[in-house]
């Protein structure tokens, strides 16, 4: 019995489902795919469009007129105040929680050298892991490994925002903005940034040396590098509704240097839906595939009606002949 089964297996003659793709079966399948995908796509698009967003680009507007022609000098001069105020008008009711993002464009966090310039073991174990060779060129300072080391941490985003509505200050919740798995398993609870940004070349933001890395959520969010040159990262949440025609005053510090490489900075206030933030790609993809399937079904149907082909005798198929002869 085993020999017979092995022979059937090696000769690919085991019993199997071998459907005959008739025109009616193929056309019906394409129609069903279209009937399923189009509603899913429309529902996804509706969910995406229900998200309310306010996007404000401030990198150019927050540069004094005197430095409009030389923004790099402005951002590098520490004696110049970087305070800036922006007024954002709410055009549609925004239901809490309202997510605050900063968006950077033309910023290649996916560059190979940049992505590799970190030490995951050091982030978790601190000075117990002394090998920081992967963090070049920001690996050590005064003979000690920098904690945290590497270009990613060194370039930490450091613009800050505060919000008010009229005379009422809007409280920003900055807790739980990072992934729980990152906080618990990738950043040490006993690792402190005691010598971060102490070198001669200062990059982005600084860290509180008295707070462990597991609680430095700005850093944790930043260390999860983006795959595309335009990306958003979560800054915090406003946990009260914003009404139509409200004017939100944003007081920000324009500290982060994107002018040296032609990058842009935007502040984003966004609600969310059951599908997440605003993103039309999923809905458009489902809808496009659905309409394409229905179009192909109609083409197959017209071809079959215009030039019908007679069905072959399925009993003449090789595997059916074998079963008949046996």
Image (cartoon, rainbow, N blue to C red):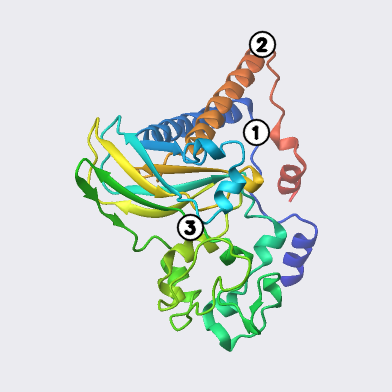
Residue at (37%, 39%) from the top-left corner?
Answer: 86
Q: Earlier in the sequence, mark 3 or mark 2?
A: 3
Q: Position of residue 315 (x, y in %)?
A: 71, 36
From this viewpoint, is residue 179 visible?
Answer: no
Indicate which label's residue lies in the foreground, 3 or 1: 3
Q: CA distance from mark 3 to mark 2?
A: 67 Å
Q: Residues within 10 Å of mark 3 (few under 14, many from 20)?
A: some
Q: Which label is found at residue 158?
A: 3
Q: Position of residue 57 (x, y in %)?
A: 47, 38
From this viewpoint, is residue 20 visible?
Answer: yes
Q: Nearer the viewer, residue 205 or 233?
A: 205
Residue at (19%, 46%) from the top-left corner?
Answer: 168
Q: Secondary structure at mark 1?
A: loop
Residue at (43%, 80%) from the top-left corner?
Answer: 189
Q: Earlier in the sequence, mark 3 or mark 1?
A: 1
Q: Earlier in the sequence, mark 1 or mark 2?
A: 1
Indicate which label's residue lies in the foreground, 3 or 2: 3
Q: CA distance from mark 3 to mark 1?
A: 61 Å
Q: CA distance from mark 1 to mark 2?
A: 19 Å
Q: Which label is found at residue 76?
A: none
Q: Nearer the viewer, residue 148 or 312?
A: 148
Extreme residue in the top direction: 306
Q: Which label is found at residue 306?
A: 2
Relative placement, left or right, of 121 versus 41 is right
Q: Residues within 10 Å of mark 1 (few under 14, many from 20)?
A: few
Residue ID for mark 1: 21
Q: Position of residue 25 (x, y in %)?
A: 58, 30
Q: Is residue 15 above or below residue 30?
A: below
Q: Position of residue 293 (x, y in %)?
A: 57, 28
Q: Is residue 318 above or below residue 5?
A: above
């Amino acid at each position: 019995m085993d020999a017979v089964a092995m022979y059937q297996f090696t000769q690919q003659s085991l019993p199997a489902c071998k459907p005959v793709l008739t025109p009616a079966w193929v056309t019906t399948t394409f129609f069903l795919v279209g009937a399923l995908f189009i509603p899913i796509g429309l529902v996804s698009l509706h969910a995406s469009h229900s998200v309310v967003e306010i996007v404000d680009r401030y990198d150019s507007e927050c540069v004094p007129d005197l430095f409009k022609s030389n923004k790099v000098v402005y951002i590098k001069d520490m004696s110049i105040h970087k305070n800036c105020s922006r007024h954002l008008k709410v055009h549609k009711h925004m239901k809490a929680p309202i997510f605050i993002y900063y968006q950077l464009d033309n910023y290649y966090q996916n560059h190979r050298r940049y992505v590799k310039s970190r030490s995951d073991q050091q982030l978790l174990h601190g000075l117990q892991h002394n090998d920081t060779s992967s963090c070049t060129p920001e690996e050590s300072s005064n003979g000690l490994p920098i904690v945290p080391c590497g270009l990613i941490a060194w370039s930490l985003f450091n613009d800050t925002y505060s919000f008010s509505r009229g005379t009422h200050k809007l409280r920003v919740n900055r807790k739980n903005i990072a992934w729980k798995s990152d906080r618990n398993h990738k950043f040490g609870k006993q690792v402190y940034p005691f010598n971060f940004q102490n070198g001669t070349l200062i990059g982005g933001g600084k860290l509180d040396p008295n707070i462990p890395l597991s609680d430095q959520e700005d850093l944790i969010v930043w260390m999860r590098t983006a795959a595309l040159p335009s990306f958003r990262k979560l800054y915090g949440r406003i946990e009260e509704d914003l009404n139509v025609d409200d004017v939100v005053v944003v007081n920000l510090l324009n500290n982060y240097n994107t002018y040296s490489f032609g990058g842009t900075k935007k502040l984003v206030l966004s609600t969310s839906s059951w599908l997440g933030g605003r993103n039309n790609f999923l809905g458009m993809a489902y809808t496009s595939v659905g309409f394409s399937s229905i179009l192909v079904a109609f083409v197959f149907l017209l071809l079959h009606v215009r030039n019908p082909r007679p069905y072959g005798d399925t009993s003449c198929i090789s595997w059916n002949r074998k079963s008949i002869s046996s």
